[in-house]
Image: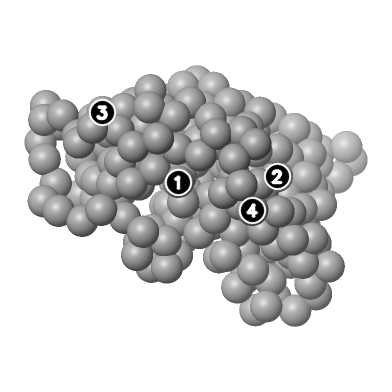
Amino acid sequence: MRSLFAFLFLSLVAVPAVAADNMVTGPAPSAKESPATPAAAPKAGDPLESAHAKRLDKLFSELKRERNEHAANRISGQIWQQWLDSGSPTVDLLMQWANDAIQAKKYPVALDFLDQIIALDPSYAEGWNRRATVHYMMGDYTMSMADIDRTLQLEPRHFGALAGMAEILKDTGRKKLALSAYERVLQIYPMSRSAQSAVETLTQDLAGQDI
């Protein structure tokens, strides 16, 4: 199961190349150093926020209709880029530092950055989702599921968070719930090969249990 979370994280850090153009660059501080003065993120009703929401709605509509796997993968990458763009240079920078810490397996340092992100912008779904991933990597399923729940409250279409929840449910023996979670992924992202494979495997496993 850790391999799936690793895959999800690598997917996250692989797509921000476009979003990274909007990030503030500079040396990563230690966990004890304070970040720069926070920049205001777009508020609800802000034209930038509205444009962001419309862009996501369009991409999700395309993702649901697309039946070519490679084209669907490109669309999902564009969705990840939208999710990663917080609208705040400070939050984007902290996320970059958190990613670096995760890749270096410095999970407590990553958590410190992610805690700061959530404190600065509690409405930023990707901050919660990324912290869920770190909690999982540290073996804390309870905290991971709590952060996944908050992610889905903010962005119910977050197929990455749903897949993470499904894997935790599967790993803890709750296969029927895991199957339901993966089916939710496919409702949003029908061409997700990993979700298709998981649904097939779980369906076979559950059918075998009923024999």
Residues tagged 4 and 2 counted as in contact (Cβ below 8 A): no
Q: How far apart are labels 4 and 3 at the CA level? A: 31 Å
Residue 47 appears at what percent x and percent y? Answer: 61, 47
User: Mark 1 — residue?
Assistant: 87
As rendered, which of 75 and 173 lies closer to the eye? 75
User: Mark 2 — residue?
Assistant: 157
Q: Is residue 17 left or right of residue 128?
A: left
Q: How is the image coloured?
A: one colour
Near mark 3 (Cα within 10 A), the count class, few <14, some 14-19 or many ≥20, is some
User: Mark 3 — residue?
Assistant: 112
Q: Amino acid at mark 3?
A: Asp
Q: How far apart are labels 1 and 3 at the CA level? A: 20 Å
Q: How far apart are labels 4 and 1 at the CA level? A: 12 Å
Q: How far apart are labels 4 and 2 at the CA level? A: 18 Å
N-terminal of the two: label 1 or label 2?
A: 1
Q: Amino acid at mark 2?
A: Arg
Which callout, 4 or 2, points to the residue nearer the camera?
4
Q: Is residue 110 left or right of residue 84?
A: left
Residue 121 appears at what percent x and percent y? Answer: 44, 29
Which callout, 1 or 3, points to the residue nearer the camera?
1
Near mark 1 (Cα within 10 A), the count class, few <14, some 14-19 or many ≥20, is many
N-terminal of the two: label 1 or label 3?
A: 1
Q: Is residue 106 left or right of residue 126?
A: left
Q: Amino acid at mark 1?
A: Gly
